[in-house]
Amino acid sequence: MTDSEQQRLTVGVVAESRPGEHRVALVPKLVGRLAQRGLAVVVAPGAGAGAHLSDDAYLQAGAELGDAWKASIVAKVAPPSADELAKMGRGTVLIGFLDPRGNPDGLEALEKAGLKAFAMEAIPRISRAQAMDALSSQASIGGYRAVLRAAELLPRFFPMLTTAAGTVPPAKVLVLGAGVAGLQALATAKRLGAQTTGYDVRPEVGEQVRSLGAQFLDLGIEAVGEGGYARELTPEERQEQQRRLTEAITKFDVVITTALVPGRKAPTLVTADAVKGMPAGSVVIDLAGETGGNCELTKPGEEVVEHDVTIAAPLNLPAEMPSHASELYARNVTELLELLVSKEGQLELNFEDEIVAGACVAGREGSAS
């Protein structure tokens, strides 16, 4: 083996151990792209099985099977467990969803393990980093799957149907939050034939909502301040906003909530009174369950029935669609790797770059720049 081969950086693709996590951090079709950057790829046997990717597919793409934890760069999806941390050597570069805002103890453990850790959710949301934006790629899948779950749980049709027995009106779907997940939910519900409405505290996103063929719910409360910036609502305005939203929710068959702020408790948008006023058999899909939920009656990770309304708070919808979720996530990871590794295949952590600096959540001290 030549000196250059001995010094070649390796990317380890590990098998996810978290229950229900079927995604994998790298797919075979991107192995060749990393090889062009001078990186060797080592895949743990069975790492891609949950995403329907065989070991043979990785081998044919040019990867090797082996102990991925010993690689110089370890790519994964979920945060590592304590046992997994112990498998990595000091100085290892770790890339994945690491929950830096919601898990300070986990960050401390990464520091103690001597890892250089880069959190995918900490990548700055700037134009240059769009191809690395794993939050958006996975949120889009979450919005799509949320609508399918709602359609499955709703005891009524989504589309309008005209039959010999009469006409069935379309289901009325309200999506709270017009971010990536919310817009995808609106688009998917529209494709299924539902009558769709979107709501967001930012009135400027109304145009995006309408572009998808949905109505924008206007509660009649303006929050526009000087210079085009939104001002904080007064307590009285906030109370009135919640009252009007509660009244509006009772007119819908399905409500999908997407107001999730990492590291902070999710805002309550759907009150118990709102649920009580919804038509019998209605459905609430709460995508903010991991931080407490947007519905007052949500039980994170569970599906419950209150006031004859089903409230579901799935915690990892992208993992239910692992093939495409893994493919999109792998592209995000590959884009980040190409920023961290020079064209000559050497690790170059340039902390003058706002993406590198923003994504690094552990091990920055003493790193080369």
Image: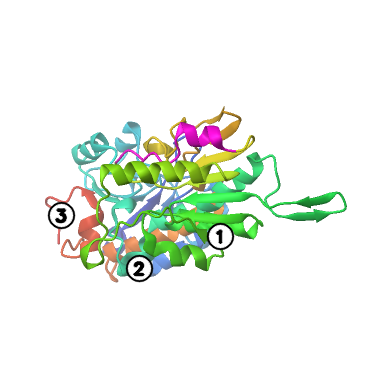
**What's the amino acid at mark 3?**
Ser
Q: Residue 367 vs residue 34: left or right? A: left
For the record, the magenta segment spans 264-278
Residues under numbered marks 3 and 2 in contact, where contact means CB atoms less than 8 Å apart: no
In terms of image quadrants, where is residue 226? bottom left
How far is the residue under mark 3 from the one under mark 1? Answer: 44 Å
The residue singled out by tag 1 in the image is: 187
Q: Residue 266 in the image: x percent, y percent?
A: 36, 40
Q: Quadrant of residue 187?
A: bottom right
Label 3 to label 2, Cα distance in Å?
A: 21 Å
Q: Determine whether label 3 and label 1 are within 8 Å by CB.
A: no
Query: Which element is circle 3 on?
Result: loop
Q: Position of residue 46 (x, y in %)?
A: 52, 44
Closer to the camera in the image, 57 or 163 = 163
Circle 3 Cα neighbour tier, 10 Å, few/some/many (<14 / 14–19 / ≥20): few
For the C terminus, the image quarter is bottom left
The amino acid at mark 2 is Arg
Q: Residue 208, relative to residue 155: is it above or below?
A: below
Which amino acid lies under the numbered mark 1 shown in the image of this protein? Ala
Name the residue tied to disc 3.
367
Q: Residue at x 21, y 67 (%)?
A: 227
Camera-nearest label, 3 or 2: 3
Q: Secondary structure at mark 2?
A: loop
Q: Nearer the viewer, residue 342 or 267?
A: 267
Residue shown at 32%/38% (left/top)? 265
Q: Residue at x 76, y 54 (%)?
A: 161
Q: Is residue 58 something that shows in the picture?
A: no
* Number of marks present in the image shown: 3
Upstream in the sequence, badge 3 or badge 1? 1
Q: Residue furthest left?
A: 366
Earlier-in-chain disc, 1 versus 2: 2
